[in-house]
Image (cartoon, rainbow, N blue to C red):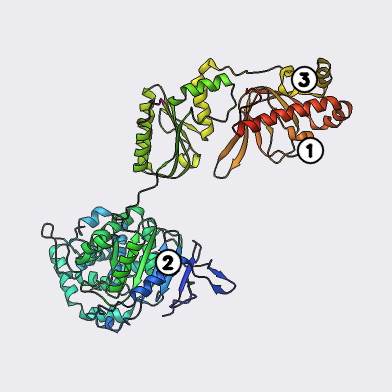
Amino acid sequence: MDPPPTLVRAGAVRHGGGSASRARPSGRPGTVRHPGRAGGVTQESPVVALLRRILDENSGLDEGSVATYIPELAKADPSRFGICLVTADGAVYEVGDTRSEFTIQSISKPFAYALALDELGPDEVLARVGVEPTGDAFNEISLDPGTGMPSNPMINAGAITTTGLVVERHGAESAADLLGVFGGFAGRALRLDEDVYRSERETTHRNRAIAHLLRGSGALRGDPEAALDAYLRQCSVLVDAHDLGVMAATLAADGVNPITGVRVVSRRTVGDVLNVMDSCGMYDSAGDWQFTVGLPAKSGVAGGVIAVVPGRFGIAVFSPPLDRHGNSVRGVAVCRQLSSELDLHPLRSGTHAPSPLRSTSTLAGSGSIRRRPDADLEVIARRGSEVFVAELQGELDFVAAELVVRSILDAEPEPRFAVVDLRHVDVLHPAIAPLVVDLGDLLAARGGGLLVSAAPDQVGDDPIGPSVKRFADLDRALEWCEDHLLGGATTAPRSIALRDHPALAGLSGEAFDRLVPYLEPRAVAPGEALIRRGEPIGGLFLLTSGRLSALVPDPGHPARRAATLVAGMPVGERSLVGAVDGVVDVVADTEAECFALPVERMPRLRAEEPGLVVTLVSNLLSIAAARIDEFSGRPAAVARG
Ligand SMILES: NC(=O)CC[C@H](N)C(=O)O
């Protein structure tokens, strides 16, 4: 059946073939782009190929028969078969008959339950419908003997009550409201199959009995016929497998439709809905489903089945012939195969989350890049095991955080400080906050503390805990620890005389005196840049005091420190070969002093003092060579400092 003309629909290119498409949130529901199409030829995604194989392998399955108790459903074409998988971020994969419409039937139940929960809140809903799996058939005439209320919202008794709650609140508008919410989940306007609605209304004696029983028990408080009518209408909403895939994906995406980007219901509601789908969604085969598939799911007697992999994707299958429980035979078979082949069963997957520890070391093994004199490096090497260093990665939930805390507390010898780097952490669960704060206190009691290096968008700007220090990057945290271990005992020369600058080594006193007029003393305040990336370098700078850092941009993070500079080092050597732009920002960390040889004075120096220039350049070369040795692991030829 053609979709309403005003709507642009995802994947409208195909029927019966296979397609992968990706739709992003935009103003129009279901607007789509086809990444796999090149030169007019549709290139099939491997995911589509996988779904097609599963479709083919199950298309010989001829058991079951189409529902006949609703006369209109008996007309269904039993050969229709489609599979649609939609990811929580909006990629759509579909094979087979994913654009043939059928009525949603009982797959409407979780979505009506979502509307009731969202509007009335869980307390009011739970007072009228339970969450106990019964193992009953979908149409069982049953009430919980303890409460007198229906056991759960996935069997008809519970679903009619859920819809009754909506009717008590919205009256005549209820059917339209339900249709609107279903459309929000599907990402397009949906409509009723009037023939199926009329056909069921005329024959629904059993549901009518249930509705009146519910009125008698007090589960329904309004007109049972009105609740029944709204329920029958909600069951008669026309969808196709693509719609159901998007609806399931919206549940997978915590209630935000991944195609339209619109939040349909709250996150909390989705959690409640998935819970009852998990325990009660497949009626009297719920246990078998749990055992073999293990995913929250819902089936309908017109042949649809949905299953949800929370946070990941939704699956929809359409095939009308049903088993004795009223579940699509091929739908169940496809979900079983997908669950087992793709390792989707949450209790069976056997996969363990990757380790949150990307690397562990101590300060003795991995110091900061701050240049320090050898005597300081010896102190750091000797006391470095007091500082445990861990680079973390991936998702930091409670389980991951427990492992990190344990590895810090089990470390030998016992560290006083722990440096935890979050640069490679993608997700931080709020649940770990108390562990972080307490770990800081525990380390503080040892005379140390916890240092966290993280970008502001990971942990915000607020203090994390009384004994937790924050740093913009790992290197700065390591540097802080080194400074702490050194205390006031550092032997680092805070400043040197210009005469002692290694760049001027070997210059005679006279030559030095002739050079001095070319130089200009310059003071740099903390935070001030001596060189800026992309801007002309002003000259050669000979550092005589203070500390500076060379910073490179790191998308998504604060600038990364690529090198540190101290008294005795040259910066801006490249300006000697002509006017060039800086490739890094060189920024002072402390008050710093240097002598500048400005670029504009260089031509005259070259012309008038060629011998002096040769000495200067060869000194700069040996300093550079020493640094290269250092980076390549060879013992430095020039003393650090
Ligand atoms: N399991 C189902 O899909 C049942 C829905 C159907 N409308 C009924 O109430 O009987």
Q: Position of residue 135 (x, y in %)?
A: 17, 64
Residues under labels 3 and 2: Cα distance? 77 Å
Indicate left or right for 319 with 29 as reference.
Answer: left
Residues under labels 2 and 1: Cα distance? 58 Å
Q: What residue is rendered at 40% in x and 26% in y? A: 415
| Majority secondary structure in the magenta region | loop
Asked if disc 3 and disc 1 are in contact, CB closer than 8 Å, the reply is no
Q: What residue is rendered at 66% in x and 25% in y? A: 637
Secondary structure beneath label 3: loop
Q: Position of residue 162 (x, y in %)?
A: 24, 63
**26 in the magenta segment:** no
Indicate left or right for 388 with 207 as reference.
Answer: right
Amino acid tagged 1? Ala
Residue situated in front as seen by the camera: 333 or 200: 333
Tag 1 residue: 579
Q: Is mark 2 within 8 Å of ligand 1?
A: no
Indicate left or right for 636 with 52 as reference.
Answer: right
Tag 3 residue: 506
Q: Give the residues drawn in magenta, as a range.
A: 410-416
Tag 2 residue: 187
Q: How many marks?
A: 3
Q: Is residue 172 visible?
A: no
Amino acid tagged 2? Gly
User: Quadrant of the image for the C terminus?
Assistant: top right
Q: Nearer the viewer, mark 3 or mark 2?
A: 3
Q: Of all residues shown, which one is farthest toward the front? A: 634
Q: Quadrant of residue 270?
A: bottom left
Secondary structure beneath label 2: loop
Q: Earlier in the sequence, mark 3 or mark 2?
A: 2
Q: Residues within 10 Å of mark 1 (few under 14, many from 20)?
A: some
Q: Earlier in the sequence, mark 3 or mark 1?
A: 3
Seen in the picture, residue 431 relative to 344 is either above or below; the reply is: above
